[in-house]
Image (spheres, rainbow, N blue to C red):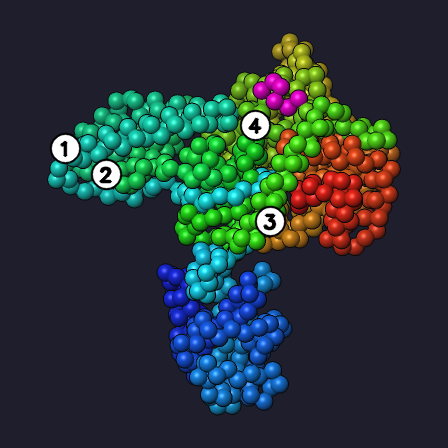
Amino acid sequence: MLDTLRRIIQLVNAAPDLNQALDIIVGHVAGTVGVDVTSVYLTDAERMQYVLMATQGLRKDAVGNVRLNPGEGLVGMVVEREEPVNLEDAPSHPNYRYIAETGEQPYHGFLGVPIIQHGKVLGVLVVQQREIRQFGEEEEAFLVTLAAQLAGAITHAGASGEMSQLLEKTDEVSLALKGLPGASGVAIGQAMVVYPPANLDAIPDRKVTDIGDELEGFHEAIAAVRDDLRDYANRMSGVLPSEELALFDALLLMLGSDSIVGETVTRIRAGNWAPGALRETIAEHVRVFETMDDPYLRERASDIRDLGRRVLTRLQSDHPASRPAYSRTVLVGDEISPTQLAEVPMEQLAGIVSASGSSSSHVAILAQAMGIPAVLGVEDMTVGRLEGQTLIADGYRGDVFVNPSVIVRDEYLRLQGEESELTEGLKKVAGTPSITPDDVAVPLYINTGLVSEMEPGVHSEGDGVGLYRTEIPFLMRERFPGEQEQTRIYRKALEAFAPRPVTLRTLDVGGDKMLSYFPVQEDNPFLGWRGIRISLDHPEIFLTQLRAMLRASVGLENLTILLPMISTVTELDLSMTFISQAIGELLDDGLEVQRPPVGIMIEVPSAVYQIPAMAERVDYFSIGTNDLTQYLLAVDRNNSRVANLYQTLHPAVLLAIRQVINEAHGLGKPVSVCGEMAGDPAAALALLGLGVDSLSMNASNLPRVKWVIRSFTASEARQLVDRACAMEDPVAIRKLYNSVLEQGGLGGLVRAGN
Ligand code: PEP
Ligand code: MG
C-alpha cells in the first residue's frame, strides 16, 4: 500500500495541471481499492458548493455539472462532519440523495473521505461499489492518507487559477494563501516571478561551429550584464546601505578587467561554446581566490561566481535579464535576494511575496526599511504559475490573494485609501512628545540595524534606538567584520542619534539568522546555539564586538549594551566579565572609555522567573516579545502553518510581561519592550496598561503607537489590561482592544495588529 501511495503522490505532483492530477487520482484509486466508482469533489469556495471534478465510473459529462450544497447528500455529510463516512448500503441512509446526472446506478458500498488542509475542507474523495460492501479499516486508512497528501497538490493547483478554469467560471476566484507578515502595508499589483540564478557548474563543454557568432553573443551578454549592474546600483543608491552598494562596483570592475572577458574569448576561439568557456574561466578564477590568504580576497570568490551566473543567464536567455516590470509589480519568488529587489525600479515595486523567509529575514529587513509591504513564508505557493497574475499582498496579516475577486479587491482598495487617510492623521502627531493625556511619558525608540537608516535627521521622531540588531551588518557581509569596521558602523549609529541613547545588542545569530560564513547545522536551531550562547563560546568574536561598541561611544557616551537570549544568571555573569575585560583592555590602551548601562533581553521564559537575581546585575530589561511569545506558547514564530496560534495578546504572554515589569519596578529597574508587539497599536495599549517604561519598534510603526499613547490615559490603559488579563481567549482580548481603539477614533489602526 505504501508503495502505491508514494507512486500516486509522485504522479500527482508531476502532473502538468489539476485536471490531469485528478484523473491520475481517480484512475489509480479505482485500481488499488478495486471499486466500481472513484470520484473527486472539490469545494467551490465562492459559491459554497461541492463540484464533481473527476470520476472513473460515473458519466464523464457529469464532471463540472454536479454541484452539491453544504450538507446535501452523503458528500455534503462528509464535508460537514469533516471525517470519513463509510456505509455498506448508501441508499438506506437518510442523507442519501440520488443524482440522476451521474448516470448512477443505485450504488451500495460508499466511502467518502474529506480532503482537508489547514483546517479547511478542500473537497471529498469518494469510492463506491455496486454491491453492498463494508470498506475495511485498511482501505479507509489508505484513502485518508492519500487525501491528506492530495491537499497540498490541490492548493497549488488552485493558487494558479486552474480551479477557476475547471469550474468554468467567468468571474475570478479569490484564492487566499497564508504566509507571515514581512513588512507592513498592503500591495496590489501584478506578480513578477524571479528565479534563482542559473547554475554555471552544470554547463557542459560543447563544440562550436561559428566562432564569430559565439563571440558576438558573448560580448553582447557582457555588455548587457554591465548595463544591468549599473542600473541596479543607480536604483538602489540611497536605498541599500553603502556596503551593499559596493558589491555592484566590485562586480563591474571585474567585468571591466581583461582577465575574465579575455580568457573566455580565448577559450571560445579554441572552439568551446560561450557558456562552457565562461564556466572554465570562472572556475579558474574562483580557485585562485579561494586559495588566497587574505580572508577578504578569499570572499571575492563568491562574487566571481555570482558574476559568472549573471553572464550565463544572459547567454542562455533570449529575453533580457531585467524584464520590464509592471507598473505595480509584486515581486514573487521561492527566495528573493537583495540584488533581485534591485531588478525592479523602486517606483514600480509595490510589494514582495516569497515562499521562504520570515519577518527577520534579510529581505524583510530591507523591505521594512524601504517601506515595501512584504509577505514571506508562503509555503503553499507554486511560484512558477503566478507570473502576470493579479496579487494582493497584505503585509499586516501575512495574507496573499491570487486573482482576487472584485469584492476582495475593492475591500483592499478601500483599506489602501484608509491607510493614506491614516497617514494624514499620523502627520498630526509628528513632532509631539509621546505622553499620555494624564502625563505619563512613554519614550518611543526605534529598532534598526541598517546603516542606511543612520543618516542624520532620518529619524527625528524616535527618542533614540531601543534595539540595534548588530547581526544585520554581520549578515550583510561575507566574513566577520573586524574591530575597526564595526567601530565605524556603530559610531555612525551613535552619532546619528546623539545625544539620544542608542542600544546596541550584541550579536544574535543562530535560530533563523545564519551567517553564510559561519554555518551551523542543528535539528532545533531556535533551541540551539543562538545569541549569547555563541558569543560566550567565542570570546574572540564577543570581545571584538564589545571593544568596537565601547570605542564607538567615546566622546558621545550615548551607548547602552543589550545582551540577547540570556537564560541563566551564569551567562549574565560571564558576559559582564567580558564587558569588564573589554573596558580594561581599552583603558590600558589609553582610551577614555566609560562603562555604559548594560541590560538583558527577557525573551526566554526562564529569565522571566529570575528577575530579582538578574536585576542585581543589570541596569535595565528589554522584553523581546518575538521570542518570548514563541517560547512561551511553543509556536514557531516563522511557521505560517501555526501563525494563527502565534498571539502576542495571549493571556500567558500578558501575565509574563506583567510579572517582569512588577518585579523589575520593585527593584528600581526600568523595562522596555522591543519585540514587534511594541509596534502593534492594540498591543502597545496593553503594554501601556502593564506599566512599561518605553517601547521600541520599526520606525514605520512609531507614529501609530505615538497616536495611541497620546489618546489614552495610563489609568484607562491599566483598567483595560486588568480586564484583558482576566480573560481566557486571545482572540477575545484582541477584539476588546480593537473595539477600544475604534471607540477612541483610532479605528484605522486596527488593521495594523497581528
Ligand atoms: C525579540 O525576540 O522580540 C527580539 C526583539 O529579538 P529578535 O526579533 O531579533 O529575535
Ligand atoms: Mg529575539
Q: Earlier in the sequence, mark 1 or mark 3?
A: 1
Magenta stretch, overall SS: loop
Q: Residue 181 occupies which quadrant of the picture?
A: top right
Horizontal relation, residue 699 to residue 573: left or right:
left
Task: Indicate the amino acid at tag 3.
Answer: Glu
Q: Is residue 318 visible?
A: yes
The residue drawn where x is 85% and y is 28% is: 439
Q: Earlier in the sequence, mark 4 or mark 1?
A: 1
Q: Residue furthest top?
A: 590
Q: 653 above or below 546?
A: below
Please give the residue where the numbered disc 1 appears in the rendered image: 212
Q: Is residue 672 visible?
A: no
* Cβ atoms under marks 4 and 1 closer than 8 Å: no
Q: Secondary structure at mark 2?
A: helix
Question: Measured from the top left, where is residue 632 in percent x and y?
Answer: 71, 48
Question: Measured from the top left, where is residue 614 in percent x and y?
Answer: 78, 34
Q: Residues within 10 Å of mark 4 (few under 14, many from 20)?
A: many
Please give the residue where the numbered disc 2 appears in the rendered image: 276
Residue 440 within the segment the image draws in magenta:
no
Please give the residue where the numbered disc 3 appears in the rendered image: 411
Task: Indicate the amino acid at tag 1.
Answer: Gly
Mark 1–mark 3 Cα distance, whole angstroms, equals: 58 Å
Question: Measured from the top left, where is residue 20 in percent x and y?
Answer: 38, 66
Q: Quadrant of the N terminus?
A: bottom left
Whether disc 1's CB lies below 8 Å from ligand 1 is answered: no
Please give the residue where the numbered disc 4 appears in the rendered image: 450
Q: 137 above or below 48?
A: below
Q: Residue 343 occupies which quadrant of the picture?
A: top left
Q: Earlier in the sequence, mark 3 or mark 2?
A: 2
